[in-house]
Image (cartoon, rainbow, N blue to C red):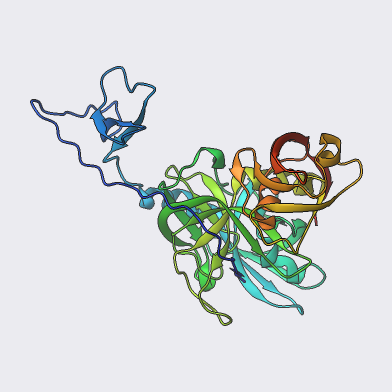
């Protein structure tokens, strides 16, 4: 039940990476056990030249970097986290299928499991959901709450004292970092794949018209296939940083496999929704308070009209403005604007840069409102 992502082409500026080689003359470099492995260097921010780091670290004009750092220990992560990742099977009149999930909280008698909404949504009205644990036990599950807009759901099983996944921090990750994905692609339970973070803040939309999910996604080249949905994307220390949700495909129709373009919901964004679903069975989304012009084809997101008494109107943004950036992140189109706003919690204050309908540009500080999600 993996959603295919259809992304329209947008021009992206690619910053070429560079291969680094450091030579040390007149001495022998030694590594002490108290320091992480690798050679500490300073990269000049202007010229990109590399210098060995001194005992005082790097100056403000240079960026600290470690070359030849140790690779990720996939074997240890798999042993640590696999018992906390489950297979989910749905049998329902509206459609059956398999997916993945991970154990978020567990007490003596029950456990909360996180997955994607699209994994379990066919059983929302009628049908059965079962969870297969790592030891092979199959346990019935009930839906606690689900959120179409973020493509997240929480289900519950009456089995306690299960190992939970450690929550990471998706705001601290960088492109190029090693990651591990664990899930049940094509029904193959406890499948482990690895790769890197390929991009951050990738605007991705899935679902059908009227019930789209908008994801400010982490992109990874770790192999993700149909059935991986709802599984865990882990950092180099085995902490979850994303919920695997979608793959891009080359074919139009049919079941497609991984082409190295997988997308995950950042855990910081997901955790707020998960906690709300557990607490109340419902969740909320932030509201900018604008309607976008669907006919606009230029760069940015054009505001056709404002919602009365919502954040954008209160901040003074005029209708007809074109949003060009939100908190310094460039906005390419309407989807990019929606995805970026959805990445915040309701009540957050964001800086919205616009091109005004009268000419010129201006930035506005907007306090986001709240609305029931979906």
The image position of residue 199, as x and y in percent, is 49, 52
The image position of residue 11, as x and y in percent, is 52, 58
In front of the other: 65 or 365: 365
The image position of residue 131, as x and y in percent, is 63, 64
Drawn side of residue 114 relative to residue 62, left or right:
right
Q: Quadrant of the C terminus?
A: bottom right
The image position of residue 191, as x and y in percent, is 46, 63
In front of the other: 47 or 129: 47
Residue plotted at (29% across, 40% down): 69
The answer to whether residue 81 is seen in the rendering is yes
Is residue 93 placed above or below 141 in the rendered structure?
below
Residue plotted at (53% across, 79% down): 251
Is residue 158 placed above or below 260 in the rendered structure?
above
Is residue 190 placed above or below 107 in the rendered structure?
below
- Residue at the limit of the structure toward the left, as seen here: 26
The answer to whether residue 112 is seen in the rendering is no
In front of the other: 32 or 353: 353
Residue plotted at (73% across, 43% down): 359
- Residue at the limit of the structure toward the bottom, as seen here: 254
Is residue 194 placed above or below 3 in the rendered structure?
above
Q: Quadrant of the N terminus?
A: bottom right
């Amino acid at each position: 039940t993996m959603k295919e992502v259809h992304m329209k082409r947008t021009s992206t500026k690619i910053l070429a990476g560079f291969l680094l080689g450091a030579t040390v003359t007149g001495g022998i470099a030694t590594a002490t056990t108290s320091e992480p492995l690798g050679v500490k260097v300073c990269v000049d921010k202007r010229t990109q030249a590399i210098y060995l780091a001194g005992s005082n670290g790097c100056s403000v004009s240079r960026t600290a970097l470690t070359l030849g750092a140790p690779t990720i220990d996939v074997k240890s992560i798999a042993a640590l986290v696999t018992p906390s990742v489950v297979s989910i099977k749905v049998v329902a009149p509206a459609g059956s299928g398999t997916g993945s999930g991970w154990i978020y909280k567990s007490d003596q008698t029950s456990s909360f499991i996180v997955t994607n909404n699209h994994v379990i949504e066919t059983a929302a009205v009628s049908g059965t959901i079962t969870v297969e644990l790592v030891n092979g036990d199959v346990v019935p599950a009930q839906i606690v709450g689900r959120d179409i807009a973020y493509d997240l759901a929480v289900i519950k099983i009456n089995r306690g004292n299960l190992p939970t996944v450690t929550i990471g921090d998706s705001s601290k990750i960088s492109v190029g970092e090693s990651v591990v994905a664990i899930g049940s692609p094509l029904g193959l339970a406890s499948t482990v794949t690895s790769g890197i973070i390929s991009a951050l803040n990738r605007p991705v939309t899935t679902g059908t018209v009227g019930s789209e999910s908008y994801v400010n996604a982490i992109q990874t080249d770790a192999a993700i296939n149909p059935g991986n949905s709802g599984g865990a994307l882990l950092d180099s220390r085995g902490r979850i940083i994303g919920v695997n949700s979608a793959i891009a495909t080359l074919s139009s129709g049919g079941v497609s496999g991984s082409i190295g373009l997988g997308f995950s919901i950042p855990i910081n964004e997901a955790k707020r929704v998960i906690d709300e679903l557990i607490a109340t069975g419902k969740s909320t989304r932030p509201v900018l308070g604008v309607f976008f012009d669907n006919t606009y084809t230029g760069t940015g997101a054009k505001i056709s009209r404002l919602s009365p008494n919502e954040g954008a109107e209160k901040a003074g943004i005029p209708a007809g403005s074109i949003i060009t950036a939100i908190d310094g992140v460039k906005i390419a189109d309407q989807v990019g604007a929606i995805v970026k706003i959805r990445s915040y919690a309701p009540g957050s204050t964001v800086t919205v840069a616009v091109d005004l309908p009268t000419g010129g540009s201006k930035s506005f500080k907007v306090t986001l409102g709240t609305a029931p999600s979906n």
